[in-house]
Amino acid sequence: MLIPFSWLSEYVDITLPPDEVAHRLTMAGIEVGDVITRGGWDNCVVGYVRSTRPHPNADTLTLCLVDPGDGPELEVVCGAPNVAADQNICFARPGAFLLNTHTGRQEELKPARIRGVVSEGMICSEAELGLSNEHDGIIVLPADAAPGAPLNAVLGDTFLELELTPNRGDCLSILGVARELGAITGQPVHVPEIGYPEAGPPVDTLAKVTIADPDLCLRYTASVITGIQIGASPAWMQDRLTRAGLRPINNVVDVTNYVMLEFNQPLHAFDLATVTDRHVVVRRSSPGEKFTTLDGVERTLTNDTLMIADPAQAIGIGGVMGGANSEITAATTTMLLESATFHNLNNRRTATNLNLRTEASLRFEKGLRAELAPIALRRATQLILQTAGGAAAAGIIDVYPDGQPDAPVPLTERRLRQVLGMDLDIDRAETVLASLGITTRRTGADSLEADAPYWRSDIAIEEDLIEEVVRIIGYDEVPTTMLSSPIPYHRPNPLTELKEALRDALAAAGMEETISYPLISAEDLTRLDLPEDEQAPWLRVANPMSTEYNILRPEMIPSLLNTLAYNQAHNDGGFRLFEIGRSFGYQDGNLPHEREWLAGVMSGPRFGDNWLTPADLMDFYDASGIVSTVLGRVGFTASLQEAVGTRWHPGRAATISVRAATGAAAEVGVVGEMHPDINDRFGLRPEPVIYFQIALDALSSARLDTEAAETRFQSLSRFPAANRDLALLAPSDVPAGQIQQLIQRVRLVERTELFDVYTGENVPEGMRSLAFRIWFRAEDRTLTAEELNRAMNGLTRVLEREAGATLRG
């Protein structure tokens, strides 16, 4: 939201520098994101075009005689199609620095010979002055602009760019910001008068309004104006709309936009001649009903869409956009002006479902008070009479089904001091509330009740009034005091500590943490071949911010693969990403349930571009090695067993189990290379993508291996190790990891590594050859050959007995 100082100053005197205004508003809860200054056009003035004539050597150029107001007339070559005599224009003298639209740089303007004629300046477009990208025509200034006046004084301005919280929708208006600034600085606020002559017949004889669904339309007010003449709005109104970021259209539409920016109440104008029986019906749409909006798009509606209609057809979508069948045109002479209050949540759902966000829906979805509608209506009617002529009907239509005023909000001095922790009397609170336009009445010596003003929809309880008081007097006035009770003792959370340890271990292993939204689309789950069924229904969000992302992820994998796809599209190289997050589903089929996971994905070259190492791609063993290392660093001994599934590349996936101090193993996750078909569906590069996930609740509940968890120093042995190679014939269904674990259990074995796997000639069917290198060491002596032979003999007996593995001949 842009707030021009030139417009803001009409309602409140601005006594502070712009930066101080921004600071004071921000400290009061109205965040100012930026202060923008427009101007700095030295050597630029208002010029007056005395006459024009064609350029003798160019058909598309015009020679203009310009009066700069403070010197002799100058001849200027201009290529704009809209330049004409008797115009006030933006004139730049030589020496001015303007944007060169061809080079995109600020350059000094110099006299130039153009097709044989010297141009002694420039008539500027918005692009040359940096106001916009528009350079098809020059800027035509109002007729009352004085030639010779500095352009900074005419077009220069300062703007506040607001970044509002959802509860302060009132500051989407100029008057809303003026009221805030007035309360902060103690300046009075000047609210425009809203009276106008009612010269027409009674409004009830000209139009009728019926609210068929009062739960969605809380109030509907309307006025009727006859004999209007559609045309351009006054220059001052166009200028204010342009500065606020809106494009002028015509006098009637401009007035509705002007009052929306002024009072924060959206309005809409209908050509009354197009409304059947001059009867407006506010109703729900029929399922599947189609409607063409002002932007020319035919939209299919749901039965929760609030429609503005007549007895024959729909003429607008309530609070979002009007229809092409009832818009104001050059032929319009009689109009109905709507100012209504719609249900904010329904309005937001409608705008989201239709993917149609407008300035009106932005305001309605934040909630507007019904008392605002007739006030804004009368202000807009007044301005239309001034800009489009005509006669306003006597009275207004006001259909207000509820019509009950809001209950007053109480405030006591005791509660004020209790919440703020400071001595603050009720008199000062009453003064502050009055400065914000909040009407109060004393109900006792130290208590009062307040009525929320018509422009504020965020004041409903006592704490709201307390917040208003403290933010205006300043949060820095709240004293710093000691806690009234001892600080609670720290209670360790094992799951939190585990997550932090995992983060550190993963970062040390070269992984990078990402954070993604838990909302995904149905398409993501379809790519994973994860259909919705009665046994595993998807958990949908009832009121999503996006119609596309409306499902809470049942697994982490879609988020990680989408993150990888985004990074691959923007960067080269390898990616090692992990996330600690939650999945969502139903527990026992009826109650929502959250589960925390550690998930990671790896893909791309193992090393960066390097002439020393080959450009190998990461594979299953890179991920499984990181998983084992990380689990080891947090106190678990990991083991892997082959896993199968349609999402995995065959033979390249494994379940992850951890062994606790009791020796029992618990399955906690899976690691595997994604199937190429799934990679294609997610738009990933044609290279291995390895994914792993670990259930943190299962990991946390597993007993820590105390021997592995405790970091201890062990001195290096003074005695040498001896190694032996062992070639075995083992059944194909016995994992090599199981055999390796059996070897590690034998006394004197320090470590072992698998260095060869062979199947084929000379190996019986159903068997495979596994070759291990084994290191033996004793802590107190050098091992003899006899001791090594005894150890090997005992080792082969264990392997044959427990794994069916025999020595290969």
Image (spheres, rainbow, N blue to C red):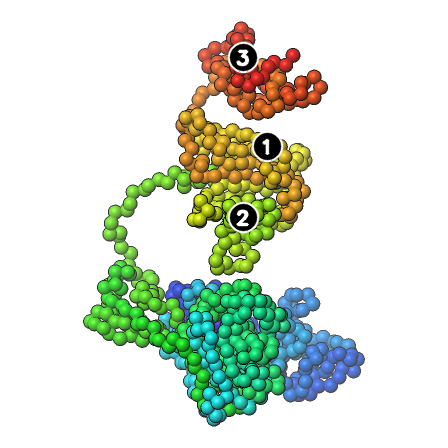
The residue depicted at 64 percent of the width and 75 percent of the height is 125
The quarter of the picture where the C terminus appears is top right
The residue depicted at 55 percent of the width and 49 percent of the height is 532
Distance in Å between CA atoms under marks 2 and 1: 35 Å
Question: Which three-letter amino acid code belongs to the residue tagged 3?
Answer: Arg
- Mark 1 secondary-structure assignment: helix
Q: Residue furthest right?
A: 57
User: In the image, which is nearer the foreground, mark 1 or mark 3?
Assistant: 3
Q: Is residue 457 above or below residue 63?
A: above
Marks 3 and 2 close (CB-CB < 8 Å) = no
Q: Earlier in the sequence, mark 3 or mark 2?
A: 2
Which label sits on residue 533? 2
Q: Is residue 731 above or below residue 482?
A: above
Give how far across and how far down residue 535 sits, in percent.
Answer: 51, 46
Q: Is residue 630 above or below residue 37?
A: above
Q: How many marks?
A: 3
Residue 707 as seen in the image, left or right of residue 108: left
Give how far across and how far down residue 231 sits, in percent.
Answer: 59, 85
- Mark 2 secondary-structure assignment: loop
Residue 252 as seen in the image, left or right of residue 407: right
Question: Which three-letter amino acid code belongs to the residue tagged 2?
Answer: Asp
Residue 538 as seen in the image, left or right of residue 83: left
Q: Which residue is mark 1?
A: 621
**Near-viewer residue (135 or 152):** 135
Which label sits on residue 316? none
Distance in Å between CA atoms under marks 1 and 3: 30 Å
